[in-house]
Amino acid sequence: MTDHIPVKPANSARIILTLAYPESRMDNVLLKACREQEENPNLKIISRGALKALFTAGKIMIKGQRAKSSSALAKGVTYVDIIGF
């Protein structure tokens, strides 16, 4: 079985979340992943408030759909695209 990898939108950064168990909120997991990644220095230093603003502006996407900060994440791999980075 092959995993479907969604197309990365233009002008975006991709964060790949690999979870061993489900998470009830996406915002905390994504903030930690942004700070741990090395590809985008602007995301590495992002503040909690700036990340919240990206959620509010609809610039955080999962499978091409707008994500909410309170969205739950399933166990496994999730591809998160952040538009504008």
Image (cartoon, helix red, strand yellow):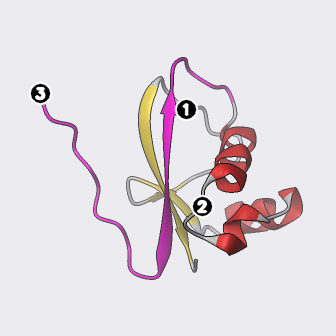
Q: Report the residue at 85% width, 62% height from top.
A: 47
N-terminal label among 3 and 2: 3
**Label drawn at residue 4:** none
Q: Is residue 68 in the magenta section? A: no
Tell us which disc is closer to us: 1 or 2: 2
Q: Which residue is mark 2?
A: 38
N-terminal label among 1 and 3: 3
Where, quadrant-wise, is the C terminus in this rendering?
bottom right
Q: Is residue 83 above or below residue 56?
A: below
Q: Quadrant of residue 2?
A: top left
- Label 1: element kind: loop
Dot 3 crowding, Cα within 10 Å, few <14, some 14–19, many 20+: few
**Label drawn at residue 73:** 1
Q: Amino acid at mark 2?
A: Glu
Q: Amino acid at mark 3?
A: Met
**Residue span colored magenta:** 1-24
Q: Position of residue 15 (x, y in %)?
A: 51, 54
N-terminal label among 1 and 2: 2
Q: Circles 3 and 2: CB distance less than 8 Å?
A: no
Q: CA distance from mark 1 to mark 3?
A: 21 Å
